[in-house]
Image (spheres, grey):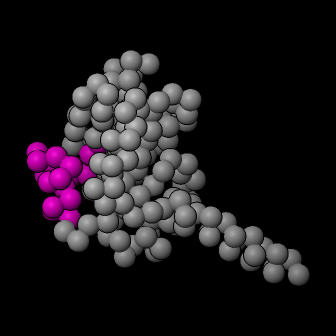
Amino acid sequence: MNKIIVTLLLLMSCVGLKAQVKLLTLNELEQRVAKGKDTTYVVNFWATWCGPCVEELPYFEKLNAENSKAPVKVLLLSMDFKSKIKDAVVPFVTKNKIKSEVFVANASNQQTFIDGVDQKWSGALPATLFINVQKKIREFYEKEFTYAELAAHTKRISNL
């Protein structure tokens, strides 16, 4: 009886988490950002197989938690292949208890997606995009952030 209860609880928790990881096209990202005129978006491009990406993810989680009442949204956009959602991304999100919104790039051509984010992006990870539509700010960085750098950029852009 206990095994059945544990199995049911595990299945229910996995179902909830799968809803947490969604596919996102570049067009959908642009539409989302356009709607949040007074919001600063911090979009981190990462992958489960990228060591520096995994190291900095807790900083984005901390930024998200500390700004939960501010007009700041952290979006974690995985560049893992779409086919890896169930096998790699969802288990990674579950294991690391990620609370930020997590998406997987929904692109038929990764290079077109990369170029659409920023023409200067070589495709290297991690990378981060800061956007504030109201202030007409769009800053792209192909680098790993410390928490202090991430918080300072967000504060400057948001005037927090």
> Does residue 95 appear to the left or right of 12 in the view shown?
left
In the rendered image, the quadrant that contains the N terminus is: bottom right
Q: Nearer the viewer, residue 144 or 8?
A: 8
Quadrant that contains the C terminus: top left
Q: Which residue of the protein is positioned furthest toward the top in this rendering?
A: 159
Q: Is residue 159 above or below residue 129?
A: above
Image x and y of residue 32, in percent? 37, 47
Q: Is residue 148 above or below residue 114?
A: above
Would residue 52 be visible to someone looking at this image?
no
Q: Any magenta on residue 92?
A: no
Residue 100 image offset from top left, x and y in percent: 50, 47
Quadrant of the image occupied by residue 141: top left
Quadrant position of residue 48: bottom left
Q: Position of residue 20 (x, y in %)?
A: 53, 59
Is residue 13 visible in the rendered image? The answer is: yes
- Name the residue located 31 percent from the left edge and 60 percent from the top edge: 25
**Nearest the eye: 144 or 12:** 12
- Residue shown at the point (29%, 25%) measured from the top left: 135
Q: Is residue 126 magenta?
A: yes
- State how many labels appear: 0
User: In the image, 1: left or right of 26?
Assistant: right
**Residue 67 screen position, x and y as percent:** 51, 30
**Which residue is rendered at x = 40% and y = 50% of the image?**
76
Q: Residue at x 33, y 41 (%)?
A: 34
Check the image and report above or below for 14 versus 136: below
Q: Give the residues in magenta.
A: 110-128
